[in-house]
Image (spheres, rainbow, N blue to C red):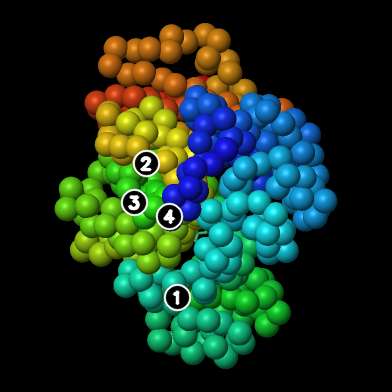
Amino acid sequence: MSEHNPSGPVILPGSTIGVLGGGQLGRMLALAGRHMGYRFVTLDPAEDSPMGQVADRQITAAYSDAAAARELARQADVITYEFENVDAGVAALLAEESYVPQGHALLHTTQHRLREKRAIEAAGVPVAPYAEIRTLADLEEALGRFGTPCVLKTATGGYDGKGQRVIRAADEAAAAFAGLGGGVTELVLESFIHFEREISVIAARSPRGEARAFPAAENIHVDNILHVSIVPARIAPETARRAEELALALVDALGVVGLLAVEMFLTADGQLFVNELAPRPHNSGHATIEACRTSQFEQHVRAVCNLPLGGTELLTPAVMVNLLGEHVEQALKWLAEQEREEDGLSIKLHLYGKSEAKLKRKMGHITLITEDIDRALRWVEDSPIWKQPETRS
Ligand code: AMP
């Protein structure tokens, strides 16, 4: 069910969108796309995945299972993915047997920190000073140039702070190198940026070349996992505009189709450095569901289906806070007991349908809608939900 367009087909509602991965991002994508009349099929190794619960169908198989990928291609008119580490063989098979407007080139780039940094620089966008590290001598040489502290990271496979070590003094280099599998595993050293804020901008681009950026969000991490995301970011409007322009420059330079989440560091003197890219919906964009004219999920559907993109204007300030496995019991207790609307503060709970509340696992999020961001942050601070059991009063 597609109409021809010189820059790629338009995939009309009624068509089936296949999604590789059935986690919460796929779930929210399907919820948004179903409103628009699309059908969804997901491929995920876990039965009853968060997306499987709301999709038309789930194929339950390993991501590397070629027969299952072929079945996904057979059932879907267009295919997208909700995570980055898509197996190259499966990506090639899907591209051959179905329509994957996002292609594989961007995945290949963002799966590897060095390739990603080179692509960002080639687009004229700044990254923190970095060096490729193959040997301990490379590391010592780069540390000599950058000074300490620095952050040593694996080139592939790291997320939520896994696969990285901060090197605070030169004599920590050998242990960090060995600890991350240096010599065997490809590593990247980055200068440590003493940032004032971490922000992110999610931008979308469609095959017809239309591009739009969401307002910059400010992100606060705890133990390297996103805790709170605030829109609009509490930064100068001029800086926010610059961040949005950088994200738009990247989607154009990289020929992105769909969403690109751009994480950045902002220093006290107003410099922006891109830290990471993610070619998919992003945790820091969840507040767009309530806070923007179009959510990141609807925008991704629009972009991969080559529909006109939706408006990204902020309708209200908002604070999104993640619910991890250790928070969910308290959150449910609170849900049963508390009013969900306070004067001037709306509290929207999202749960992802995961049955097992493992420590640090993302189980859901709460979006607080308010004109008063400080009040929303106080609400999070005062709530028993995010207090560890031993510190709960
Ligand atoms: P990443 O896995 O690259 O997203 O890093 C996880 C978190 O570690 C970031 O959100 C930052 O808080 C911190 N971090 C990573 N790289 C750097 C850096 N070069 N300078 C300062 N902090 C960093």
Mark 3, residues whose alpha carbon is within 10 Å: few (<14), some, or many (≥20)? Answer: many
- Identify the element where label 1 is drawn: helix
Q: Residue 118 bears which disc, if any?
A: 1
Of callouts 2 and 1, which one flags the residue occurring earlier in the amino acid sequence?
1
Q: Separation of disc 1 and disc 4 at Cα?
A: 31 Å
Q: Residue 211 bears which disc, if any?
A: 3
Of callouts 3 and 4, which one flags the residue occurring earlier in the amino acid sequence?
4
> Above or below — where is 246 with respect to 228?
below
Q: Separation of disc 2 and disc 3 at Cα?
A: 10 Å
Marks 2 and 3: CB-CB under 8 Å? Answer: no
Q: Residue 308 bears which disc, if any?
A: 2
- For marks 3 and 4, give the one nearer the viewer: 4
The residue closer to the viewer here, 201 or 233, is 201
**Quadrant of the drawing holding the N terminus:** top right
Q: Separation of disc 3 and disc 4 at Cα?
A: 17 Å
Query: Which residue is label 4 attached to?
Result: 6
Q: Separation of disc 2 and disc 1 at Cα?
A: 31 Å
The residue closer to the viewer here, 289 or 113, is 289
